[in-house]
Amino acid sequence: MDNLVHRSAASSPAGDKELVSYSDADLDNAHVRGIETSPETSLHRGLKARHITMIAIGGAIGTGLIIGTGKALAQAGPGSIFISYTLVGFVVFLVMAALGEMAAWLPMSAGFTGYASRFCDPSLGFALGWTYWIKYIIVTPNQLTAAALVIQFWLPRERVNPGVWITIFLVAIVCINYFGIRFFGEFEFWLSSFKVIVILGVILLALVIACGGADGDPKGFRYWWPNSPGAFRPYIAEGSWGQFLGFWSTMVTATFAYLGTELVGVTVGEAQNPRKTIPRAIRLTFYRIVIFYCVSVLLIGMCVPYDSKDLVFANTSSTSASASPFVVAITLAHIPALDHILNGCILLFVFSAANSDLYIASRTLYGLSSDGAAPSIFRRTNSNGVPLYSLGTSAAFALLAYLNVSDDSKEVFSYFVNLTTIFGLMTWISILVTHIWFVRARRAQGLSNEIMPYTAPLGIWGSYGALAMCCLIALTKNYDVFVGAWSEKYKTFITGYLGIPIYLLLILGHKLWTKSKGVRPHECDFYTGKDIIDREEEEFLAAKAAARTARPEKKGAAFYRRFVSWLF
């Protein structure tokens, strides 16, 4: 069994060198909690900078943005979804910035589970890791369910059983994850690049439709004017109060759309030069949120009225198979064949999201094991650096997608959205709390912003503000279940709030079992294992410099890096 190197009480550079010094022999027999060095348990750093940046945005462009916006648009109107997506997008950027500051200082194999255990409280790390894993073993079958829903645009469930498509996609994503991180990274890079190109094309198409370039009918903001049908649709109540309730009801959809952007915190264990690639991916998140989310939501609200019967969630009696408001926009503009092409693109979106979700689920379970919060078998890897036991266990839960075979797709999809949203919010809350403790600790120990590889733009106050907003959304996101017939809405209540007691029980149960205590600011350990990362970084930069000397950068590569790479 590996020897565990415990954290030192001292956390100054001098104290670290005195108490935690490693030789090559030591590293072969020692296990620093959250950082794997043994060949039998370590991951391979096969993700390049372009892989990381593309996975960050590609994993988030999935069912939430492409399909989920249909329900929000039908329920609350275009003005509501534009405000909610913009507001939640800013919160997401603050969460990403907080995560980036910690990941840039100490890239750990355990991801943000390890940061919570090390910088805040071991019980918080335990609860964060397990709820995040639960979230992804739910969201993976959720994506598979969405794929079956999208395919019904062509083949109704009466003709082909949805279980056929679920089986095909499930086998495919398991195989892709099995072949190793280099294959996964390259596959996901090109697939996500295609997704980005399609989204840019859709944005341009929506702009053309809104300006009348498709059917000669310039719509502009016609559907935003009162009674046409309007920018804000009342929900539950009438008047301005009903319009506000409609807006707030879309916060859950907006939150679900952004879930997954924080997954770069899980990839640090397999990223090349993570101290540079992770902050870069974080910084570019802001621009991507504005372009891919806010602009696309604004334009779709200009092209599709919220009372359109073609929206799959708009009317329970609707027979349309259009699962996306983008497909609806093309249909309403009477553009032949293009709706089929876009629906095929959406299918690839969902497949890519399912692929990355299974990856994150397996690496989260691996990180829990590395942090000592799960059985050690889950951190064992094969010759390709793939944690097979974690992958197999996570893939087994994807079989939940077969619920789609015996139940209505739309209903199952709604339940999955509700459940994964609360787990995602618990993740964001944990990251923000950890960052607040992290900043307090480094201030107490004299670690200034100048020596940090990356700092959150709004600092600790940005995390406080984002934390307050996340808590507010978590507590009120399903307020509508308390209005109307309880017998019809109790399922929504259970799936909407189940994550909160699970999260709290995991924290309290771990504390009672392990007698763990929170980390005090002056005792927080910033340095144990940092020398391992420093050495890896030096070796990588030296090898990269040697390769650059032997093969100078071409002009085309420089142009791509400066002007195009921020999109990809």
Image (cartoon, helix red, strand yellow):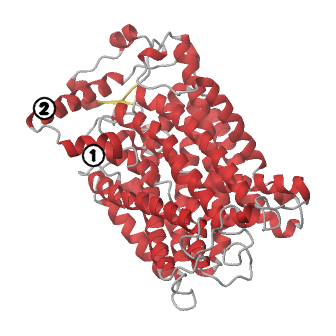
Horizontal arrangement in the rendering, residue 476 relative to residue 529 (left or right)? right
Which residue position is annotated with label 1? 46
Q: Amino acid at mark 2?
A: Ala
Vertical placement of residue 59 versus 448, above or below: below
Residue 126, position as x, y percentages in the image:
56, 39
Q: Position of residue 411 (x, y in %)?
A: 68, 72
Q: Residue at x 66, y 69 (%)?
A: 304
In front here: 392 or 311?
Answer: 311
Q: Residue at x 36, y 61 (%)?
A: 191
Q: Nearer the viewer, residue 480 or 549?
A: 549
Task: Report x, y in % for residue 313.
Answer: 69, 72
Residue 243 falls left or right of residue 406: right
Q: Amino acid at mark 1?
A: Gly
Task: Pick whichever of labels 2 and 1 is earlier in the sequence.
Answer: 1
Q: Residues within 10 Å of mark 1 (few under 14, many from 20)?
A: many
Residue 16 drawn at (x, y percent) = 38, 13
